[in-house]
Image: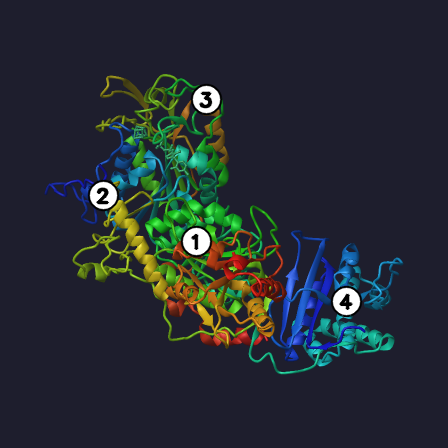
Amino acid sequence: MTYLAKPKFHHPSLPKNEIGFTRRDYEASTSTLCAGCGHDSISASIIEACFELSIEPHRVAKISGIGCSSKTPDYFLGASHGFNSVHGRMPSVLTGANLANRELIYLGVSGDGDSASIGFGQFAHSVRRAVNMTYIVENNGVYGLTKGQFSATADRGSKSKKGALNSDSSIDLVAIALQLGATFVARSFSGDKGQLVPLIKAAIAHKGAAFIDVISPCIAFNNHAGSTKSLDYVREHNEAVNALDIMVGRDPITVNYAPGKVAAVTQHDGSVLNLRKLNDEYDPHDRLAAMNFLQRHAAQGQIVTGLLYVEADADDLHSNLDTVETPLNQLDTAALCPGASALDKINASLR
Amino acid sequence: MPLAAVNDFVIRFANVNGSGSASANEMFARAIMRMGIPMAPRNVFPSNIQGLPTWFEIRVTEAGHLGARGGTDFMVAMNPQTFNADVISIEPDGYLMYDSTRAIPPGQLRADITVIGIPLTQICNAEYTDPRQRQLFKNIICIGALSALLDMDFAELEKLIGEQYKGKDKLIAPNVHALHLGREYAKANFACPIGLRLKRTDKVGDRILIEGNAAAALGAVYGGATVCAWYPITPSSSLAEGFAKYCGKFRHDPETKQARYAIVQAEDEIASIGMVIGAAWNGARAFTATSGPGISLMQEFLGFAYFAEIPAVVFDVQRAGPSTGMPTRTQQCDLISCAYASHGDTKHVLLLPEDATEAFEFGASSFDYADRLQTPVFVLLDLDIGMNHRLCRPLSWDDSKTYDRGKVLSAEDLDKAKDFGRYMDVDGDGIGYRTYPGTHPTKGTFFTRGTSHDARARYSENGATYVDGMQRLLRKLDTAKGILPKPLRSNADKPTRFGVIYYGSTAPAMSEAAEILAKRGHSLDLMRIRAFPFHQDVASFIADHDFVFVVEQNRDAQLRSLIVNELGIDPVRLVPVLHYDGSSITARFISNTIGDRLDTLKVTPLRKALS
Ligand SMILES: Cc1ncc(C[n+]2csc(CCOP(=O)(O)OP(=O)(O)O)c2C)c(N)n1
Ligand code: SF4
């Protein structure tokens, strides 16, 4: 139940970050999502990333649309202002919020239905406007909250739980983000905390539009044979470009092995993951190469994960609009109102 | 007998869109104003960009009637395409001026009108070689000729040319020369002046001539708006563009030259209202400008903002609908769609300015209302107000005023406060306290959502909690009634059983109509509504009269429906007077409609005659 706050008991020996906060300070209400939902693992990664970055939780604004994924801001960073907007329209609300106060950290959380269908336009435009944000899509290929319809990221030929065949081709949000000029583009897997946490940290640190597509299996509606977003399917088809350790979204499993090596990791359900660590050769500074890489592996039925593209000194919407450093919401009457004498001059010019 | 009148006639220019006539016509209008004669200019234009017909009308009115009069006394027919229709539209015994370079086919002119042919093309071709110059100076020569025909103060025109081309001084002499060419031609070939004349007087006072959208944009600047997100749509685009212009002028940091505002042309109206809501949630004053189709797209977000209690300002410049309807024609047809925008039970604050000055005033105060009431506020203009220049009171500002940001808690407030719940009605006025994101490390955060929530903003589908919240929203609207602009009442000099209710751009035509009706022996008390939810005075005004005419510019009597619905009035007592052909409502229309109704009362029982 979302209204059940977690007990605020802090074990005295819990590790603290640079600003003296424990992980618990980044948590919030207990999740109401299905146990094992990939989205909860993403929440955990967000918590971890913010803890590690020593972010003051109240300096984060977490904004989402509608869907199971969009519910998650209720389950992390309880000391932050949250905003569940309307279906597919998180990006515009986030853009407006960012315009009002450039100093906060903006975390946009959305689903694949939310961002690739009803909100496809807003997704695209917030990215091309270079809004300084971390935009996370929790991508399960289905509409979770409305019980299992296909989303626009579902692959052609995949089957719904009810057996319907998806005959439409899918939208790859990462490819689109690259094409639209996002200055930070990544894909990850909800169970791969080791890969996801650093990506979220880097995205938050990035100034400009940072986009992360996180494959996040839906236990309830998309974890069956025939789905191409099921746990098994993604495990088998994961071609990671850098941070590579994959975990199923329950209790975290840690692995420790050398870069460039492949490790077989047994999961709670007995299945075995073949993990391959960071490909050091991959250069994430070449947009064109990133697009090629993505398409080449997509043609082989593989999902590329990792940081695909980053532009170090990117601009953001505020630099493009050349707005003042002081947040617009802090400007007072004196700074904003031209006053009576200016109006008298205007009047005089209109006679 | 040709028409004869001093400072009281309608002149209309029929032009081809894109021919450069607009600035010449406006200069002509301004010169009349500078002669101290009140006048009301109006653009009449179809929905197209180039090549098709457009008209510009000036009602010269020493009596100061600024509503449209209807009819044309003097037609300047510069558009061959509409020539025949233009000639037909001239009032009996009126005047026609045309380019006589080419002869009019025989049989196309009326016997009663006075025809004034000026060979404009011929004069231009003889004088100029550049084709664009030939086109532009044609308009100036035309104004020069009119100055002689109507006995204008020529110095005012010369002065205006000087002002218009200040900084581009080498354009002054050729323009003045063109004025002279027209003036001399008219003097040499016609008995100047004709029956219609302009005579200097002092009836303009300190009034200014300003476009409604520009005034509303200035209102947004003065009201402290820092975020504007919009999507182009006629007739509202010039409002957002005006905001950009005035911000460019007034809103830059003096040292860094950086902008103290942000303007985003959004991808659509859904995004524009989303940005406004996001910005306002985060403590900036934000607005969008749109028209009816945009309001339709914003519905879900507007309901969200109402329920989650987020301030937002929406300028709706109404045009004829439904759908694209007549996109460049005026109506007051979004009243209900704005008042009840969205699904579920919603009710929004509306401000209803009558002209540019009130568009400025209401535009500026709309941000205070939105912040104080924590709810969307609509400023309802229409094309007639927004896209025409209107003579109106000068804009004024009280420098001692500071913005009222409503109930916002700072970090210090939160430290002192015992308790915080975003939607708790601590003061009994239906309005909770809010905090901006990022204010305090441990206190005052809350979750904003469109799903039902309790007083602490926590998700709850408990029926009683939901009903409590919805009732509180009604209490908030009661608070609104006390602070919004009150309706203005003016009583007839005799006691009367009849009243009239109207709003917005109907105002000038209505006051003129009341004078006409008084002369016909019909006394009427008037009430101009300026805001929704309706003030208590509206109900008492209706109670004071047996029957009240409700004059508005739409087919379905939306204001009347809103009054019936909100105040529980017997519909029979509210008599609709509806004008909705897209043109500005006229005093003629109102006085004829109401007058005829009242005349029938002499022979028919009251209830039957009016119902
Ligand atoms: C305007 C509108 N249309 C439809 C819905 C119903 N709806 C709620 S969530 C949802 C889909 C969510 O899918 P996704 O974004 O993929 O999130 P998930 O639940 O899978 O995490 C839909 C269609 C809605 N809330 N609003
Ligand atoms: S339905 Fe799917 S997406 Fe929604 S909570 Fe359950 S597992 Fe997660």
* Label 4 CA crowd tier, 10 Å (few <14, some 14–19, many 20+): some
Q: Where is mark 3, residue-wise?
A: A166
Q: Residue at x 45, y 34 (%)?
A: A117
In this view, the residue in front, A318 or A278, is: A318
What residue is at 21 percent from the left and 49 percent from the top?
A: A19
Q: Quadrant of the C terminus of chain A?
A: bottom right
Nearer the observer: mark 3 or 4; the answer is 4
Q: Cβ–Cβ below 8 Å for labels 1 and 3?
A: no
Rendered position, B514 above or below B575: below
Q: Which residue is label 1 attached to?
A: B339
**Residue B363 visible in the shown view:** yes
Contact? badges 4 and 1 (CB < 8 Å) = no
**SS label for mark 2:** helix
Q: Is residue A208 visible?
A: no
Circles 3 and 2 on the same subunit: yes
Where residue A142 appears, x then y in whole percent? 38, 28
The answer to whether residue B593 is left or right of residue A182 is: right
Circle number at residue B39: none
Q: CA distance from mark 1 to mark 3?
A: 43 Å
> Is the residue under label 4 in contact with that under label 3 (CB below 8 Å)?
no
Q: Position of residue A113 (x, y in %)?
A: 41, 33
Q: Nearer the viewer, mark 1 or mark 3?
A: 1
Element on which disc 1 rests: helix
Q: How much space separates mark 1 and mark 2, taking CA atoms?
A: 41 Å
**Label 4: chain letter:** B
Q: Do the residues at discs 4 and 2 belong to one chain?
A: no
* Residue type highlighted by circle 4: Pro
| Alpha carbons under labels 3 and 2: distance apart | 39 Å
Which residue is the site of mark 2? A26
Q: Earlier in the sequence, mark 3 or mark 2?
A: 2
